[in-house]
Image (tube, grey):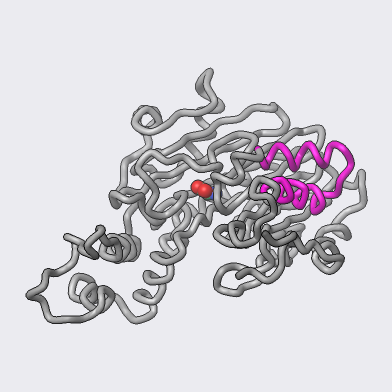
């Protein structure tokens, strides 16, 4: 077992957002996961125009839900093991202290909007599966095929990568076929796919992503709301629900304190009720960044700080305090592809990325 290496350097790397606002001087600001530059810009624009904080963050994440190139959220998301895109989302509205969520919903491009309807138009908080879909249809949402050709290609490659105990896979050509790799033969099924798409597909087969977008918005009145939306873990068992629709895990907002959300491996987040843990740590006086690190320490503790096990996944938290101070931290400094983890911020100018603080360096 290896010990955590929480160095002074890693701690200092978490100072993002400290200069963003002085306590008591709330400003209009949005914080999101790495894929949320556009979401933050739209959310801030809407909040500055006087729109509600929840409407603003939902409009922000809608950009990603409808983007076929983000394969971890909404339309274009990678599917479950049966090739079906299943979406999870939740919302929390600080001023009214309400929440809504949907889990494992199919065929609906904007699950965040359905989550808001659950909050506003029902006496429940979380609807799942077929019931969530019927609820969405009842409110006028149209069903759409969310599986893009790009995502279907990746799913097909994943299916073709599986082997039984004899090294056999019925989804691959048989012994009589000319000998070549699964990616090459896949080109016959997807003649439009270029090398870059095939390389991307190989990567997501080897490292199933748990992307997601979380966006938190604060207006000048100090009102705060949040939204988290995702297509969840690629190749999951049908019906698997991650942290994103779970209030207190994928998102938590307390108007008295602030909000927090998460992206990454949902199973690990659920076990520490991460969103709630971050907000409670802020309530007790920790900075947003330190609060995110505290939740990650609990995740590491669940594996007795065994870095070999912890290296199999990543998890990031984002936090926005009621006074506008914000922060983010990831379990690992870098992604499995070696890219520095970062998050998105907009406080009135152009959206920007800032580096996440991190608990662990040197992923192996
Ligand atoms: N955080 C997204 C998921 O695990 O489904």
- If the image is split into quadrants, where does the N terminus sit? bottom right
Residue 157, by quadrant, is bottom left
Q: Is residue 231 magenta?
A: no
Relative side of 257 to 174, left or right: right
> Could you tell me which residue is drawn at 21 percent across and 76 percent down?
185
Residue 75 seen in the current view: yes
Residue 53 seen in the current view: no
> Could you tell me which residue is drawn at 68 percent across and 58 percent down?
330
> Could you tell me which residue is drawn at 89 percent across and 41 percent down?
285
> Could you tell me which residue is drawn at 75 percent across and 43 percent down?
278
Residue 178 versus residue 121 in the image, above or below: below
Magenta stretch: give its range.
273-299
Along the viewing direction, whichever of 264 and 175 lies nearer the viewer: 175
Residue 220 lies, in percent from the top left, at 81, 44
- If the image is split into quadrants, where does the C terminus sit? bottom right
Along the viewing direction, whichever of 268 and 53 lies nearer the viewer: 268
Along the viewing direction, whichever of 331 and 76 lies nearer the viewer: 331
Residue 290 versus residue 199 in the image, above or below: above
Residue 281, by quadrant, is top right
Residue 338, by quadrant, is bottom right
Furthest-left residue in view?
A: 176
């Amino acid at each position: 077992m290896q010990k955590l290496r929480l160095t002074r350097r890693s701690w200092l790397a978490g100072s993002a957002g400290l200069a963003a606002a002085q306590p008591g001087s709330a400003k209009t600001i949005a914080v999101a996961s790495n894929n949320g530059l556009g979401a933050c810009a739209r959310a801030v624009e809407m909040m500055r125009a006087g729109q509600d904080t929840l409407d603003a963050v939902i409009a922000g994440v809608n950009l990603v839900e409808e983007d076929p190139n983000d394969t971890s959220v909404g339309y274009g998301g990678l599917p479950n093991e049966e090739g079906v895109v299943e979406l999870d989302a939740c919302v929390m509205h600080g001023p009214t202290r309400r929440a809504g969520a949907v889990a494992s919903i199919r065929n609906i491009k904007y699950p965040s909007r359905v989550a808001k309807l659950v909050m506003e138009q029902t006496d429940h908080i979380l609807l799942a599966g077929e019931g969530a879909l019927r609820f969405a249809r009842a409110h006028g949402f149209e069903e759409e095929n969310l599986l893009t050709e790009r995502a279907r290609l990746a799913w097909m490659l994943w299916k073709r990568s599986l082997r039984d105990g004899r090294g056999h896979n019925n989804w691959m050509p048989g012994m009589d076929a000319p000998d070549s790799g699964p990616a090459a033969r896949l080109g016959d099924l997807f003649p439009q796919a270029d090398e870059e798409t095939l390389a991307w597909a190989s990567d997501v087969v080897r490292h199933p992503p748990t992307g997601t977008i979380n966006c938190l918005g604060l207006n000048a009145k100090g009102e705060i709301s949040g939204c988290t939306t995702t297509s969840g873990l690629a190749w999951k068992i049908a019906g698997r629900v991650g942290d994103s629709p779970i209030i207190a895990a994928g998102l938590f907002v307390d108007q008295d304190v602030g909000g927090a959300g998460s992206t990454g491996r949902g199973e690990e987040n659920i076990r520490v009720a991460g969103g709630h843990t971050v907000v409670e740590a802020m309530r007790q006086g920790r900075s947003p960044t330190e609060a995110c690190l505290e939740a990650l320490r609990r995740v590491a503790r669940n594996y007795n700080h065994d870095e070999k096990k912890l290296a199999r996944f990543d998890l990031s938290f984002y936090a926005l305090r009621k006074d506008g101070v914000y922060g983010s931290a990831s379990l690992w400094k870098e992604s499995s592809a070696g890219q520095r983890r970062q998050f998105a911020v907009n406080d009135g100018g152009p959206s920007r990325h800032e580096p996440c603080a991190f608990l662990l360096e040197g992923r192996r």
